[in-house]
């Protein structure tokens, strides 16, 4: 039975994928990664991002706002609170967990 189950051609809810930050946007409000539609990313997908090292792990919600074949821009979701302390570094590894859309 399990052999008949087909995995969708995109990142499914609950899936986790580790990515490396390619570039940080000049405003600091998002990151570029070298994965795109070929690896299952789609526009408007939401992710919980976990990054940093123990004991100072950081979390942020991101949304894929631009997806190309092998490039994705993930923008920080604005909750109306100060998130300036949540900064990404280039070449940093980030664990993305696909989530659903949510209310602010």
Image (cartoon, helix red, strand yellow):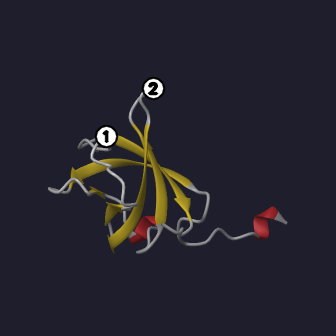
Question: 10 Å neighbourhood of mark 2: few (<14), some, or many (≥20)?
Answer: few
Q: Residue at x 32, y 65 (%)?
A: 72
Which residue sits at x=54%, y=68%?
A: 102
Please state, as top left, top right, bottom left or bottom right, where the N terminus lies in the image.
bottom right
Return the residue at label 2: 54
In whole angstroms, how far apart are the C-alphas of marks 2 and 1?
14 Å
Please give the count of numbered marks on the rendered protein: 2
Please give the name of the residue rendered at 34% of the width and 71% of the height, measured from the top-left corner: 65
Residue labelled with disc 1: 92
Q: Within the image, what quadrant is residue 73 found in? A: bottom left
Q: Residues within 10 Å of mark 1 (few under 14, many from 20)?
A: few
As drawn, is 43 to the left or to the right of 32? right
- Residue 47 is situated, as x and y percent measured from the top left of the image, at 48, 59
As drawn, 17 above or below 43: above
Residue 103 percent across, percent down from the top left: 52, 69
Residue at disc 2, secondary structure: loop
Q: How far across and how far down the image is residue 93, in percent?
A: 37, 41
Residue 86 position, x and y percent, is 32, 44
Quadrant for residue 44, please give it.
bottom left
Is residue 31 visible to the viewer in this orientation of the structure?
Answer: yes
């Amino acid at each position: 039975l399990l052999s008949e189950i087909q995995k969708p051609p995109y990142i499914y809810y609950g899936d986790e994928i580790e990515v490396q930050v390619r570039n940080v946007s000049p405003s600091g409000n998002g990151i570029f990664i070298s994965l795109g539609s070929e690896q299952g990313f789609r526009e408007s997908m939401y992710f919980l991002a976990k990054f940093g090292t123990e004991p100072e792990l950081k979390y942020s919600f991101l949304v894929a706002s631009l997806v190309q074949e092998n490039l994705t821009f993930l923008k920080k979701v604005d909750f109306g609170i100060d998130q300036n302390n949540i900064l990404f570094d280039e070449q940093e590894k980030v664990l993305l967990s696909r989530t659903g859309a949510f209310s602010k």
